[in-house]
Structures are given as structure tokens and as C-alpha cells.
Amino acid sequence: MSGAARKLGAAAAAAALVAGAAGCSSGGDSTTVEVVVGYQSKTINTVTAGTLLRARGYFEQQLAELGKQDGRHYRVVWQDYDAGAPITAQMLADKIDIGSMGDYPLLINGSRAQAAGGPGTRLVSVTGYNLLGALNSVVVPKDSPAHTLADLKGKKVSSSVGSASDGTLVQALAKAGVAEGDVQKQNQQPAVGASALKAHSVDALAQFVAWPGAVVFAGDGRLLYDGAALGRPTLHGVVVRQKFGGAHPDVVRAFLRAQDAATRDLNQHPLAAAQTVAEATGLPPEVVYLYNGPNGIATFATALDQRLLDAMRADVPFLTSVGVLKALDLDRFTDPSYLKDSGVTDGEPARITGTDAVCDRPVADPALAGELWYEGERSTRPTADPTCLLKAVKAGTAAGAGRLRAAYVPDAVTGTRWFADQDWWVRDGDAFKPFTTEDGARGYLAAHPSAVQLTYQQALDAS
């Protein structure tokens, strides 16, 4: 983002705050509307409705334009939370107007709002999604004896109960033949759970983005279970308190146009966006880019994609069976009209493009493409496939390219983007294949008897 654009965003934000200082819609100047936005700064699948959106000032810009049309002043209040549950609690108390959270928290939000009576809440857009579920994962200490999810039976597992990642954990355990009651679940906020894992006071951490990647990148754990193995779509989205939306539909539409601007910003300038989010959250930029970069684990778009809505509908009976939901009219909860009336149309998601300089061929297949990010370079180096990535790392080392901040490569089966040096590698003929988990590598080896397992260093040496 240019310095001029950044100054414009900051000026718009400041103008909105100053204009709103005279009062608010709930008790001050009747021409002033206060909008309270609840978001999760470190849940980086929601940055286009939270962290990045706030940093760029897009919502304040939209409201400034709206104010020119209707003569009102608008004031945005940003409230940061660790998970979706407290945002729902504040919405039910009429203290948050617009919030963003994961799919399970969204369903709980809609259910509880409907049970409370009145207009309820509405799901109005998506922020980011993964069609296989890779946004949620389970990590264990690097020295853990666990090889598969089934090895967690009888162990302490930190999880945020009611979160999207907790739902993935419960369903994944059931698929592995482990009842939820067979693990000692510790209900903890993500940061608390990450600290507990590092201290070995829990045996595993089941969390949503960006916590698994952050734990692994810090050297405090390894990926035990890739949520993509479950094969169920997961998403985060934007929910609106309908009492507020009914009174101020133009504000909701302004928010969605601002979210669209943030989405396009991220998709067109993913490295710069990741660095902005990292600066705002304190997360390592390499971790943010793992999830939010091109071909990343998250696809960013605003549309209420039918595939995602179908997945949510399928989740309702499960959440009801485990006692999380009492009832939910999903058709009433989902409202695409705000998005339609805002005039937003999704652009193209970020993709790795260019030419692989080492293999000397175009980077064409997103299921194979990777990236190398070197210290001091303003852009990443694209690689055509995992084998080319290994060769590029070797070539960069030989040429004295400097410190390699991160090498990103997709899992050979699930496509989950991960750190190449944290993957499990397999050589099959002349091809090198990376896997995010030991279980995934073992599954491939079992089906391909001639293939051999390698460490990352062995794969580099042999490439």
C-alpha cells in the first residue's frame, strides 16, 4: 500500500472518530451513529473483516462517503477478542453490531439469537474458507510419542470449546474411533493452550488459524492432524445484529464494500497484506503469509457460497446431537440481500504465478506450486512443484542468497500449504512429495511400496 493511500486511510479513520465524538446513536446526538465491530485480530482467516480492514481504514472511508450523502456522522469502535463466543455474548447484549467468527460459532450465534427472540442475527458474508477443512489442525510437542490422532486417547488436549476447531477435533476423533470422552479436553483460549503445549502441561493443541502454524514455526510443536483430512468445508464469516442492520442497512452495505476492498487488497498484494497483519498482531509474518498468501490455506472471498452453506446445514444435526445447539432456522439466519444490495462482486483469489527460475518453466499448477521467501527481498520466488522447490533451495544456498525466511509447499494429497522444512518427505522415483503429517506420509508409502521416506535435509541432498 502506498504512503499516500495509508495516510488517506488514517485520515478517514481519524475524521470518523472526531466526527463521532459528539455522541452516539444510543444516547447522544441523533445525527451520529456509533458502529461497534467485534473481531479476532489473530484469527487471520477473518482479517478482511477485522485486522486488515481496520489497518487500511476502508470502513471509515466508506462511512465518510455515506455521511456526505445522509448528513450523519459515523464512529467506528473496534473490539478485539480471542474467539467467537464472547462476540456472540456481546451481540446478544446489544453491545456489538457487526462481528466475524468461524462456522460453528456462527451457527451457535444464530441459534442463541433466535432463542432470545426478536430480530436475531444474520450471516451476511464470508471472509475466508477452505473446502477441505485445513483451517483447523491439531499440533503436539515435537517430542510427542503420538503418531496419529488415535494416539491421543486418554491424553490432555487443549481446545476452545464451541469453536470451529473444536468441532473439527470432535468429528476427527470420532472418525479415528476415539470418543470425545476418551480425551481429557482442556477448555482454553488459543494463547493459553499454546503456552500449555510449550510447557508440556497438555499433550496436544486443537486450534484454528493461525495458532497451529505459529506453534510449529516457533519450534514448539509439529502437526499431528491436518484438518483437510476430514474433508469437510470450514469457513469464517460476518454476522450482523439484525436490529442494527434493519435500522442502518446502509452501514452494513458500507461494511461489505469495505470488506470487499480489503479482500481485493489481500488477493492483489498478499505479501504486503501479510506484513501489515503481522505488524498489527505480533504474529510472525511468515506464519500470516502461510495462511493468507497466494495458494494459501485460506481462500478469501465474500460470497455466501452454496457449498459452504450446505456444509453449515450438515453441521446443524451434529451440533444439536452434542448439545451445543437447541434449534436453528438456517434459512432465516442467512441473509444474502445485504451483499447483493452492496454491489460487491468477488475478484480472483491470489495465485502463485511467474516462472520457476531454477526449473525454467512457468508456474501453472496451484496444486504443486510453492514459494521461497528470502530475507531482504520484496517479493517471493515461485517454484513449479515440490521437486523444483528443493532444487531452488539448494541453488539459493549455493549462490549465497541469504537467509531463507520460509519455504512454502502444498501437501501432495490434501494441497494444504505448509512449511517445507516441517513436512514429511517421500521420494517416489524422480519426484519428491511433501506431506503435512506423518500419518499422511505413511498412507502414501503404504499405497506406493517403491517410495521411500526422507527427512527434509535428505530430500534437499537428493534433489
Image: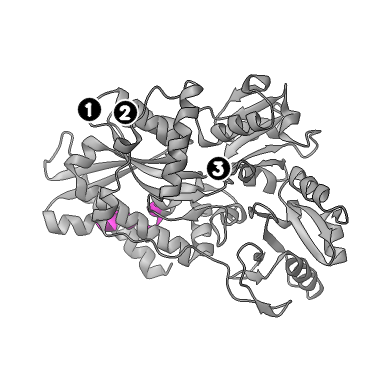
From the top left corner, tell me how far across and down residue 333 is, in percent.
32, 36
- Residue picked out by circle 1: 118
The structure residue drawn at horizontal position 41% and vertical position 43%, both measured from the top left corner, is 309
Left or right position of 253 against 85: left
**Residue 124 percent coordinates (x, y):** 32, 45
For the record, the magenta segment spans 53-62
Kindly identify which numbered label has been placed on residue 232: 3
Question: Which element is circle 2 on?
Answer: helix
Does 256 appear above or below 208? below
Q: Which amino acid does label 1 sit on?
A: Gly
- The nearer-to-camera label among 3 and 1 is 3
93 or 146, which lies in front? 146
Q: Neighbour class for label 3 at 10 Å: few (<14), some, many (≥20)?
A: some
Residue type beneath disc 3? Arg
Rendering coords of residue 199 (x, y %): 71, 31
Q: Specify the amino acid type for callout 2.
A: Ala
For the residues bearing labels 1 and 2, Cβ distance under 8 angstroms: yes
Q: Could you tell me if residue 200 is visible in this image?
A: no
What residue did someone put label 2 on? Answer: 113
